Image (cartoon, rainbow, N blue to C red):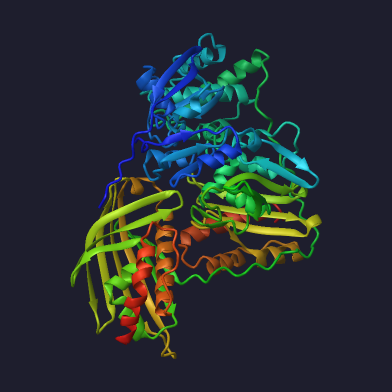
Amino acid sequence: MKVIVTPAAANQSISLTINDRPETVTVPPRTTLAEILRDHLDLTATHLGCEQGVCGACTVMVDGRPTRACLTFAASCEGATVETLEGFKDDDLMDRLKAAFHRNHALQCGFCTPGVLATARDLVERLDTADEVRIRNELSGNLCRCTGYVGIVESIAQVIDERRGLGLPSTGAPRVAREATTGFAPFDADIAERPPAPAVSSGTMTVEDGWSVVKREVALNHSADAVWAHFSDLDAVAECLPGAKLTDHDASTFTGHIGVAFGPITAKFEGEGTYRTDDSSRVGTVAGRGKDRGGQSAVEGELSYTVRLAQGDPDASLVDVGFRFRIQGMLGQFNRPELVNGFVDYILAEFVANCDAVLSGGEVRESKGISAFAMIRAVIGGKLRALFRRT
Amino acid sequence: MKPVPFTHEIPKSLQLADKALTGDNSKVMAGGQSIGPMLNLRLVRPTTIVSIDQLDELQTVHIKGDVLSIGAAVTHAQIEDGIDDVDLPTMLRHVARSIAYRAVRNKGTIGGSLAHADPAADWVSAMTALGAQLVIRNAHGKSRREPMAGFMRGAYRTALQQGDIIVAVELPTAMGKALWGYEKICRKVGEFADAIGAVVIQPDLKYARIVVGATEDAPLLLDDMAREMARTATAPSLDEIDGALAAHLPGASRVKRQLLKTALSRAIAKVIPS
């Protein structure tokens, strides 16, 4: 296994204005604005919490607009004007906000406060009137675990009223009121017939004890004998799993890797596992564990399949495919389990389609996964002919 | 929590962007509010990032004839606030203001969101409901148009090829007069949606479309229901909605179906008074 080491990208020189002072920093391109502020300029009022744009702790003003400093990379800061909590010199609205926060107990531990103040500063400028629901909704992007927001909302409302008292107009765009629902006169809609979506095989997706479980029932137009011959051959099964590659295996254990490409997300899990097949019940199980070194994620999974005769057609069969898996590390932290499930479902669908293609005497289809299909294609034809001779 | 080392190109023109994207593992970034978290978590590990959100040619919004064109690098906040002299359909402004948080809307772009194709994102469902077309430029500088319906193939999967850049989103200007409903259900304001329902009816165009979004997959079009709704001008019953969802999403849990049904029925109620 060759480990590809990416050479560190050359440092870039970035010039920007921070709190009215011109600054130049020389940093690698992956450096975020938050790191430029904290690690290179010692401006530590900007806090880092989640580093994925959710918590709002790093919110600062960039060109006059609140922006997530954790999602702004160095090159994008070239020429920018940044205002952090250390700035706001002679800023009347910010001074009023700070006084109001003090007055209303709008902070306790203070971790979220710099980001909250940036958001608050934007709100008192944009909102025409103090509307509690709107203020609370607008604050949803700044997590505060102490105050329950009561003092924060109160402070923002008070400063909006103070601004109005001073006769200063809001800068925000007025919200367009929706017209009342009136209905419409019946008409024949011109809807183009779309080709029906590919049939979804019936299946379920559940979570059991922290394991995601995807089950599908797949119909194949091949005899159960042929299907089982295919499914009891680990090499053939691995070849149909997009992106999978066996490096070594004996009668019951294997090592290998599986590369997955899920939109922009790529991972390569390397690991080992065991497999067993039972010719009498036509049940096969492949269990494996793998680590993705680049992304620091680990996956454990078990693929099981049962081949059954389809009723009334000797040349058709049903396969119950089940996949239990558990992902830990960064991919698990991504906190969108339903998408991972959807992805696994997609992989299973590809797997089934490949099995179908191979059983029909064809080849594994092109896949967008990171796979060694080009190599596989060279060997698969020969292997399968051997496989069908056994049936 | 640091991305892998990458080189970051900020080309001054689309031609230079094409050139920068020739690398094997290069990624377009148009705001970075979705890809940024993935970079920080190292779920995405590109060698080159090409930022296109500063290109002037992607920032224009204009009406030509009966087509409204929105540049791919227009931010959600710009749409939320309205664009100076262009009469944007109110549905767009309504959808924009409920995307994530203002700090994210200030950077995130409409083209970036469509290219990223998160199933729970707003624009993929809203633009499908509005019958939008995407103007896509390929690596050789050739442009093509693709309808939004069918553009998304699944979670994070679209019809885009390596080197493709979404340049603009186009809508019939008549959509400004459409009857519309757009409802989403989130556990927390600004979080990813658990369910989205969108309905657009434009009798002048003989147009009716019902979209169910945040299904963990591409937006779902309920064409038969839309046709029937236009023909009768009455809302489908909750049971009818439930039946359609069960037929199209056999793997969805009852909870998910209930959320989707609720979002869609609320959207329909915005078009047909109950």
In the image, residue B187 sits, relative to residue A95, either above or below, namely: below
Which of B146 and A65 lies nearest the eye of the viewer?
Answer: B146
- Quarter of the N terminus of chain B within the rendering: top left
Residue B147 x %, y % = 65, 55
Q: Position of residue B226 (x, y in %)?
A: 68, 63
When asked about the image quadrant of residue A207, the answer is: bottom left
Q: Which residue is painted at 25% across and 82% down in the image?
A: A279
Between residues A280 and B249, which one lies in front from this camera angle? A280
Would residue B79 be seen by someone viewing this image from the given angle?
A: no
- Where is residue A318? Give x, y as percent: 40, 80
* Residue at far top of view: A90
Task: Tell me the residue at 51%/43% (across/down).
Answer: B21
Q: Nearer the viewer, residue A309 or B59?
A: B59
x 60%, y 42%: residue: B110
Observer able to see residue B203:
yes
**A173 displayed left or right of B29:** right
A385 is higher (above) or lower (below) than A144: below
How many numbered marks appear? 0
Give me the residue at 21% from left, 64% from top: A248
The image shows residue A311 at horizontal and vertical percentages of 42, 88
Residue B253 vs A236, above or below: the answer is above
- The quadrant of the image that shows the C terminus of chain B is bottom right
Q: Quadrant of residue B112?
A: top right
Q: Viewer-proximal residue, A71 or A153?
A: A71
